[in-house]
Each structure stands twice: as structure tokens, then as C-alpha cells.
Amino acid sequence: MSDDGLRRARVIAVGRNAAWIVAEDESEPRLASLRKGARHAMLVPGDLVEAKQIADDRVVVDTVHPRSFALVRRTGGGRVKTMAANVDTIAVVAALVEPPLHLAMVDRLVAFALQHEVDPLLLLTKADLAGEDAAERVAATYRAVDVPTLILQPKAGRGIDGLRELLAGRRALLVGNSGVGKSSIFRALGGIGVVGDLSRFGRGRQTTTSARLVRLGAGFLIDSPGIGEFELDPLPAAEVGWLFPEMREPATRCRFADCRHLTEPDCAVRQAVAEGRIAPSRYASYEEIVAGTPAAPRAAN
């Protein structure tokens, strides 16, 4: 704590006029209201702030540190929405079964990470239900395109040490649909969890919220509500193709320099798919993104 009573803390969830924060020298999250100056900063998970306790049961966020990085996406009308701050990794959690594996969503999240120049990481869960062969097939698809991929069974401890090693010193955001095992991962890592009510600090739809944080040496892993709605910014086909690393080299051999890899003749990318050098599921995801269609559930190859 500084001489003026301020304490540095990390934001893990945000309401209109309040935030859940975890101080650097504490293990328990606190619900903090925002001073007027801090309200205008539009806090997001990952922000670093200075907070002060002004009563036994009241903490306020006083100031917000400049962001080293902001993860943003474009919304309707060309507006920009900040999703998280000060992160360098997006860890995507996907269940192999129950709920069914959604490869199109995995591919979009990996592409989103690459578009925003942060590192993607894939965490596959429920291999005990899907079978080891199925798990390894999916893992191989993503390892082949340089996406670090771990098969986890958090309750049994499988893969947790490897995950700690991969995330050491990183500032990571955990994303994934409900039911894929994020809670089990946090428990296995010894994370800090919180569930609480932010609605009394401001009007709006925000009511009950939950958030979790794991400290990883100098880094952290955050899972927070409201950050799962990732969508790629609109891009021309050539730029979408760059977000699929396995397409970059074949694309240089297409007959047309502006080939969209859809129906054009002499397309080296489609030839690579036909020859098994590009996973059909990954190519299908590329087609959907270029066409601007929603991600469709799709089984593993």
C-alpha cells in the first residue's frame, strides 16, 4: 500500500459504476465503486487500477493505469468496444463432447486472437468421454498450425502442470461456452472466484455476475462475464486467409493473385484441402467467415 492509502489491483469484472477487483497483496476479491474520474475510463477485465478503502465495507477505484494493450472489436455503426485490457493470450476452452465440439467457434476464436496479435491457446476437455483417439485427432489439427494445444482432465490433474508452464508470466483471457469445464480448470489452478451483485451500483441489465482470476507469477488468467462475444472485424478474403496460417503458402501458388479460394479455377488452397494438407473443418470455417455466415456446429475431421 502506498503512503496515500492506494492499493494496486486487477479488475476481473465490471458493472456500470462498480467493479470486482483483486489487490496485488490480497487473495480475496473486493467489490469496489468507481470515482467519477474512473467511471469515464470504461473499465474492462484486465485493467490495472489504484483502489482505496474509505470505510470498513467500502472500497473505491481511484485511478486507472494506462493500458499496455486493449482487445477491441467493432460493433454496429462502426463503434469500437473494448473487451479486455493488458492481455497477451486468449485461451480457448472447448469440450470434445457434452456440449458437442464446435470447431467453427474454435476457429473463429483462434482467428480473432491472430487478428488482434495475441497468442491463441487451445484447451480441450472431456477426453475421458470422447476417447483418446478423438482428442488426439483434434489436438493434432491445431498443433499443425502452431496453436499450442493441451488435453486437460482438471479433476484428475491431467495437463494442469503443462498449462501452468505454458501460462507462466502470461496475461491470459479464458474464453469458452458454458459447460466446457472452465470452472474445473480454475479450481485445479487454485483460482480466486467471486459471485456477486453489481446492480445496486448503477442502472442497466447487469445484475448477478461471476468472475475468476488465477495469479501465475507475474502473469494472470482471467475469466469474466461478458467477454465471450468475440467476433472478427469485417475483412477481405485475402486477410481472412492470413488468419489461417496453413493457407498462406498455398495461396501464393493460386492462378489468380486475388483468389478467394472459393470457386476460382486453379486454386492451390482448395487443392491442398483435397490432398489433406489443410483440414476440411478449418477450410469450412474459412468459407463461413468469408461469406459472413454464422458459425455452424461441425464435427471433427
Image (tube, rainbow, N blue to C red):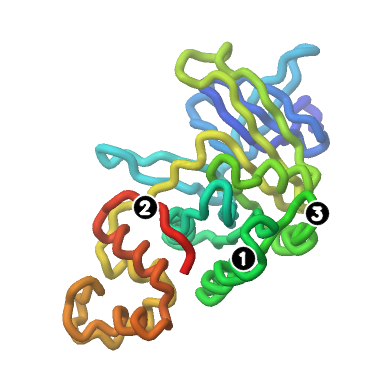
Of helix, strand and loop, which one carries label 1? helix
User: Which label sits on residue 296?
Assistant: 2
Using the image, determine if residue 235 lies above or below residue 195. below
Q: From mark 2 to mark 1, how far is it between C-alphas?
A: 20 Å
Sequence-wise first label, 2 or 3: 3
Provide the residue designation for mark 3. Answer: 156
For the residues labelled 2 and 3, say whether their Cβ atoms are less than 8 Å apart. no
Provide the residue designation for mark 1. Answer: 135
Of helix, strand and loop, which one carries label 2? loop
Could you tell me which residue is drawn at 29 percent across and 84 percent down? Answer: 268
Could you tell me which residue is drawn at 34 percent across and 70 percent down? Answer: 241
Please give left or right for residue 125 compared with residue 36 in the image: right
Q: From mark 2 to mark 3, how far is it between C-alphas?
A: 32 Å
Using the image, determine if residue 268 lies above or below residue 178. below
For the residues labelled 2 and 1, say whether their Cβ atoms are less than 8 Å apart. no
User: In which quadrant of the rendered image does the N terminus lie?
Assistant: top right
Q: Amino acid at mark 2?
A: Ala
Spot occupied by residue 274 in the image (x, y as percentages of width and height): 34, 82
Residue 137 visible, this orientation: yes
275, 11: nearer the viewer = 275
Q: From mark 3 to mark 1, how far is it between C-alphas?
A: 16 Å
Q: Amino acid at mark 1?
A: Ala
